[in-house]
Amino acid sequence: MQNWISALAEMQQQGEPCVLVTILADQGSTPRDAGSKMLVSKERCIDTIGGGHLEYKVIALARQMLEEGASQLRVERFALGANLGQCCGGATLVILEPLGQVRAEIALFGAGHVGRALAPLLASLPCKVRWIDSRAEEFPEQIPAGVSQIINEDPVEEVANLPKGAYVIVMTHNHQLDLELAHAILSRDDFAYFGLIGSRTKRMKFEHRLQQRQHSAERLAKMRCPLGLPEVKGKLPAEIAVAVAAEVIATYSQQQSQTQPAGQLDKEQQRAQLKLLTSLAS
């Protein structure tokens, strides 16, 4: 049976987010003592903190944190008898620590020159990257760690598989394919970032065609084309790749800053919860 230490090493190598659960303190009769740990991912649980309804509640809470992309510690106190109906009757203080959360899920359509320069840059970020193309021969022999290679004769089909809030970058070898991808992405309208490689002339042509497909001006305004931070100059594939990666990082940072007040409230909540540790351990 795999223990949480080896499972954590495996998950970190694979870039799989998880929550490390630790019993910080115990009082009275409890299933397991302070220091007991378990690891929870979206698909599996490794080790145990005692089973029963306590463990069921903690697993549900950990998976909720994974679903929400939580990045901060959470401390919870459970009165086993009163709250959970367990016969132990003691109390347990549990800390839930999210690990390996990706900042963004990125879909990169196109394995051409710029795509091959961009993929390693995205792989170096705390992101989950899907690299999509119909041409298997265009991919390099070594795919960067953290990047999933997807070969599909119709890349447009992959748009439906993207999670809500994905960062989408389109730079294929075919303008018609770019247009079909843009139509599918804008039709979903739930992306965090959509960048399309091309000139201002290409943008004007695409806007006209997409308007004919009933896309509003407000929705079209969310499409970044030309893409990449304008401060990063250059037309070489590596230079374009740096500009695009910089824009993705800037977009993510801006979105994170807009949610900062909520994070501050979380810290205040943590301080209040940590007081429970002091009282329980005393």
Image: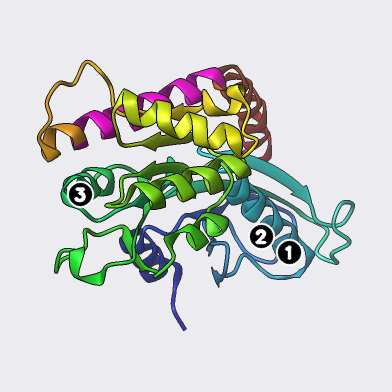
State the residue at coordinates (29%, 33%): 198
Q: Quadrant of the C terminus?
A: top right
Residues packed near mark 1 inside 10 Å, few (<14), some (14 to 19) or many (20 plus):
few
Residue at 34% in and 31% down: 202
Left or right: residue 51 versus residue 223 is right
Q: Is residue 235 above or below residue 124?
A: above
| Scheme of image coloration | rainbow
At label 1, the amino acid type is: Tyr
Are circles 2 and 1 on residues that touch, CB within 8 Å?
yes
Q: Position of residue 279 (x, y in %)?
A: 68, 33
Labels 1 & 3 near each other (Cβ < 8 A): no
3D distance between C-alphas at marks 2 and 1: 5 Å
Classify mark 2: helix, strand or loop. Answer: helix
**What is the number of the mark on residue 120?**
3
Q: Which quarter of the picture shows residue 140?
A: bottom left
Can you identify the residue that label 2 sits on? 59
Front: mark 1 or 3: 3
Amino acid type indicated by mark 2: Ile
x and y percentages locating residue 93 in the rendered image: 66, 47
Real-space Cα separation, disc 3 to disc 2, in angstroms? 34 Å
> Is residue 115 something that shows in the picture?
yes
Residue, disc 1: 56
Indicate the position of residue 204 as horizontal and vertical percent values.
41, 26
